[in-house]
Amino acid sequence: MSIASMTAGPRTLFTDERVRIPTRMFSTSAQAVQHIVLMIENLIRERRSAGLPCVLGLPTGSTPVSVYRQLVRLHKEEGLDFSHVITFNLDEYYPMQPNEVQSYWRFMHENLFDHVNIKPENIHIPDGTVELEDVEAHCLDYEQKVRRAGGLDLMLLGIGRTGHIAFNEPGSSPVSRTRLARLDPVTRRDAASSFYGEEHVPTHGLTAGVATILDARKIVLMAFGEHKASIVRKALEEPANEACPASFLQNHPQAVFVIDEPAAGELSAIKTPWVTGMVDWTPELIRRAVLWLSTQANKGLLKLTSDDFREHNLHELLREHGPAQVLCKQIFSDMLNTICEHPGGTTPTRVLCFSPHPDDDVISMGGTLIRLQEDGHEVHIAYMTNGNVAVHDHEAIRYANFVSEFNQMFGLASEKTAELEQKVIDSLSRKKAGQIDSDEVLAIKALVRKTEAIAAAEAIKIGYELLHFLDLPFYRTGTVQKKPLSEADIEIVLNLLETLKPSQIYVAGDLADPHGTHRICAIATFEAVKRYREAGGKLEVWLYRGAWQEFEPHQIERAVPLSPQDLLSKRMAIFRHQSQKDGAMFLGSTDKREFWQRAEDRNRRTASLYDKFGLPEYFAMEGFVQWNGEPV
């Protein structure tokens, strides 16, 4: 089965014996969400027509947000009735007040319950305010309420990177019930950005147990994005075990995984389909297989032999598209053609890089920006959000103090500036962990990011007049949770395209999180490009990756070589983003290297792989993929 044929629509993967749970894969998360919403809608209407309640188990987190938004739309536009729906949420942080920004009680009301006609008495969420001595009784009562409601008709689940479902972390028993559970360190790190630091994330949570989940009549687990690929493979292809609680769904007769193509990336049927059975050999899959063979055999492309193909289960490829010499020469030539010393061409033109955060440009494609600048192109950078959520409180205080001292030093001090400084300090000193900043603090944090972006661009010789600070509305919440994309966001991007009329644009293609800033910015940009082209505008669209990963060699359509000096200049530009030092720790990454270290490692890894394929050797490379107009 080729990658191309799999992107046309959903595909059931249970035909591969390695996949132990029925699985539907969609080319995009939007298609997967549409499928899940249709399942829920049909169930609600079916139970309603039979005069029966519809009992749903619901998750929180970024993954189900689009599902809830679609359900709200169905209620408002198509009259989907929630008056007979009973809901049980899976978990809640402990301790946690319901009005706190990170509260799952607040999350559910803001994203679903406040917008549909569900009865308040039909909403059940574990109570993060109960006294510790009352927790056990509260959990028992929760179980009894589920039973009194007739049990769960449908349990909707997400999956954490540890394999946890709800707060059932690795080590959870398959017979566990609703209880107070200790959160895994990885789970707490993943939640760190919502709490403005890992140290503020609660160590415990109330959770429905594995057995409680397995009691549901039907279970749908959602997983979207590349960052879920590894744990999806473990849950689906490895035997059920306590190290991956989601794998216990293998024991449920009506469990199904609904995933997008990136989340399926590590499944054998997707990653190495030639190992699992017959393959429809498209050019894309041939390139992937031959490059994979080169790494497995530890040989350059032009050194591979027929024996290498046969020894690694690629005899079908050899028979259909061989001989080996011809096949490998073709892939070698294809990869050689991806190497591009002059990404903007040799004739000076106008280029625009869209940077979701104020540092994504230099972190992700700083070397290419240097090359474009050196080749005489007019290089513009559009910073799509102000990035203020990622600035520590102490940075805001430091800059407020600096302005105060500056004004004192040069006789510019006034009662107004002193009052503002004190207001900022007082606001931050009273601020609780994870609380939303005041407007003044948010403005200061945004200014910190803006001035750092200006300094970073200057480091690669791009002047202030070529920088554009779009400050898209969807981002302006002061929290990690963002507003839905709006027409205003798209119009801002479109207006910039119409003003600059660039021949090339670069867009962050780091789309792992369906509701992350990169993804929303990409969707806004793609829609703006579509409208721009429909009006007669012409431009190329190239995707780059963010700080966390690089495109794999079989995906790369353009590889820009970087010299040691290019990489050093890129590092110096990244250094200008001082407030983002140790940003990985603040954002909860398990990778504690700084941004510049991760960026350099992945750039050098790409160059190393090209070298191992027998291609020209370079110090480092940045990889790009051309956007072909497909939805994300």
Image (spheres, helix red, strand yellow):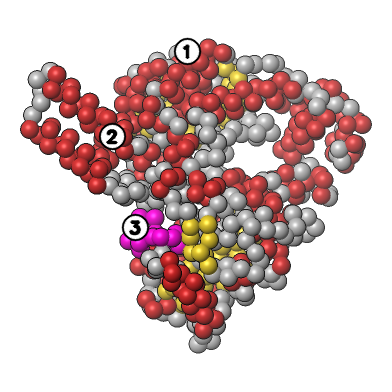
Crowd around label 1: few <14 · some 14–19 · many ≥20 (10 Å): few
Which one is in front, 10 or 442?
442
How far across and how far down the image is residue 503, in percent?
Answer: 46, 26
Asked if labels 2 and 1 touch by Cβ distance under 8 angstroms, the answer is no
What kind of residue is marked 2? Ala
Q: Nearer the viewer, mark 3 or mark 1?
A: 3
Q: Residue furthest bottom?
A: 51
For the record, the magenta segment spans: 91-104
How far across and how far down the image is residue 148, in percent?
Answer: 51, 84
Residue matched to label 3 = 100
Which residue sits at x=17%, y=40%? Answer: 423
Which one is in front, 580 or 433?
433
- Precedes in sequence: disc 3 or disc 1: 3
Residue matched to label 2 = 396
> Does the magenta run of residues contain 3?
no
- Precedes in sequence: disc 1 or disc 2: 1
Magenta stretch, main secondary structure class:
loop
How far across and how far down the image is residue 533, in percent?
Answer: 46, 38
Residue matched to label 1 = 374
Crowd around label 2: few <14 · some 14–19 · many ≥20 (10 Å): many
Which residue sits at x=32%, y=61%? Answer: 99
Crowd around label 3: few <14 · some 14–19 · many ≥20 (10 Å): some
